[in-house]
Image: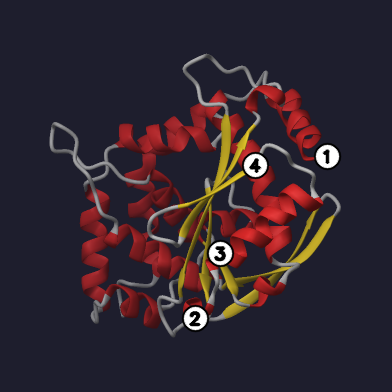
């Protein structure tokens, strides 16, 4: 049973993991169930897996991730209500999950799978804590015609399936575009806040010697000159505050000292590796 699997994860990790990390570890287990359904169903052919969770499941990105992101071929032909019904039948019918709720956001492309069962899997929660474990799924149309669809074989417990995903070069392009296009909100001091995980992933791409698909990157950002992309990226990086970076990354790593070291050395890591993106001389 699903609840037994989640309970075993809590028992194995609750002494060493922080509560936020443990929640994300439980989310990762649920993500595996969703992926198994999607890529064992009619939806698998048109759903292209992307984002940090795709890097985690397909390439071993050494951090946890919150959401499942898919671009959908022929997105306008996708029936969200049918997808909701089919996914609900999978959890409630096939997996016998009684505590389950499907919530669709107002934009009709973002959905939440809610599992109000944290107290039942052994996680210590206070009266002020939510008892709901949720997985967010983001669906959207293809954002560029420039991409390479590839596949990965995935084995998770008793599940075996083949994932349709973007290439690493495509995902690197999307990550850089997300960094450049992210809508920042400001705190009272006027400082920007952001998704620190994007910047961790950027360094990971650099360390893996992955260069972005430039046609895709330029198409998504609508910036035609590579040098301008590099300049804007450099400017964006300069604005990053290490304390914000650390705060955002802590729930995705079990080793808090690593997160602190990474945050403190982030700018040096970027400067030492920025040429590896291949943007400087093109």
The residue that label 2 is drawn on is 147
Q: How many marks?
A: 4
Mark 3 or mark 1, earlier in chain: 1
The residue that label 4 is drawn on is 100
The residue that label 3 is drawn on is 81
Kind of element beneath mark 3:
helix
Q: Is residue 72 above or below residue 193?
A: below
- Compute the Cα span from label 1 to label 4: 14 Å
- Mark 3 or 1: the one toward you: 3
Kind of element beneath mark 1:
loop
- Whether tag 4 and tag 3 are in contact, CB under 8 A, the answer is no
Q: Residue at 26% across / 77% down in the picture?
A: 222
Mark 3 or mark 2, earlier in chain: 3
Could you classify mark 4 by the number of other residues whose Cα lies within 10 Å: few (under 14), some (14-19), or many (20 or more)?
Answer: some
- Whether tag 3 and tag 2 are in contact, CB under 8 A, the answer is no
Question: In x, y percent, where is residue 7?
Answer: 75, 29
Q: Nearer the viewer, residue 55 or 75?
A: 75
- Mark 3 or 2: the one toward you: 3
Quarter of the image for residue 37 reads: bottom right
- Compute the Cα span from label 2 to label 4: 36 Å
Q: Nearer the viewer, residue 86 or 242?
A: 86
Please indicate, yes or no, whether residue 91 appears anywhere in the rendered image. Answer: yes
Q: Which mark is residue 1?
A: 1
Judged left or right of residue 130, residue 108 is: left
């Amino acid at each position: 049973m699903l609840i037994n699997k989640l309970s075993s994860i809590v028992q194995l990790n609750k002494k060493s993991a922080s509560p936020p990390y443990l929640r994300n570890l439980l989310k990762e287990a649920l993500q595996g169930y969703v992926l198994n359904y999607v890529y064992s169903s009619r939806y698998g052919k048109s759903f292209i897996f992307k984002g940090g969770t795709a890097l985690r499941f397909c390439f071993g990105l050494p951090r946890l991730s919150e959401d499942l992101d898919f671009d959908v071929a022929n997105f306008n032909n996708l029936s969200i209500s049918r997808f909701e019904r089919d996914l609900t039948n999978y959890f409630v019918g096939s997996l016998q999950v009684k505590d389950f709720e499907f919530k669709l956001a107002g934009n009709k492309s973002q959905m939440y799978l809610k599992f109000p069962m944290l107290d039942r899997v052994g996680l210590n929660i206070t009266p002020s804590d939510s008892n709901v474990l949720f997985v967010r799924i983001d669906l959207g149309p293809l954002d560029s015609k420039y991409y390479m669809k590839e596949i990965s074989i995935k084995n998770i417990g008793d599940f075996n399936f083949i994932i349709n995903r973007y290439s690493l070069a495509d995902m690197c392009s999307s990550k850089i575009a997300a960094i450049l296009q992210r809508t920042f909100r400001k705190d009272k001091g006027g400082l920007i806040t952001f998704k620190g995980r994007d910047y961790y992933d950027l360094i990971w791409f650099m360390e893996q010697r992955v260069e972005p698909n430039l046609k895709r990157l330029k198409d998504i950002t609508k910036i035609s000159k590579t040098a301008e992309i590099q300049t804007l990226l450099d400017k964006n990086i300069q604005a990053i505050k290490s304390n914000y970076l650390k705060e955002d990354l802590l729930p995705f790593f079990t080793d808090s000292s690593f997160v602190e070291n990474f945050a403190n050395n982030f700018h040096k890591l970027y400067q030492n590796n920025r040429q590896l993106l291949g943007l400087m001389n093109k």
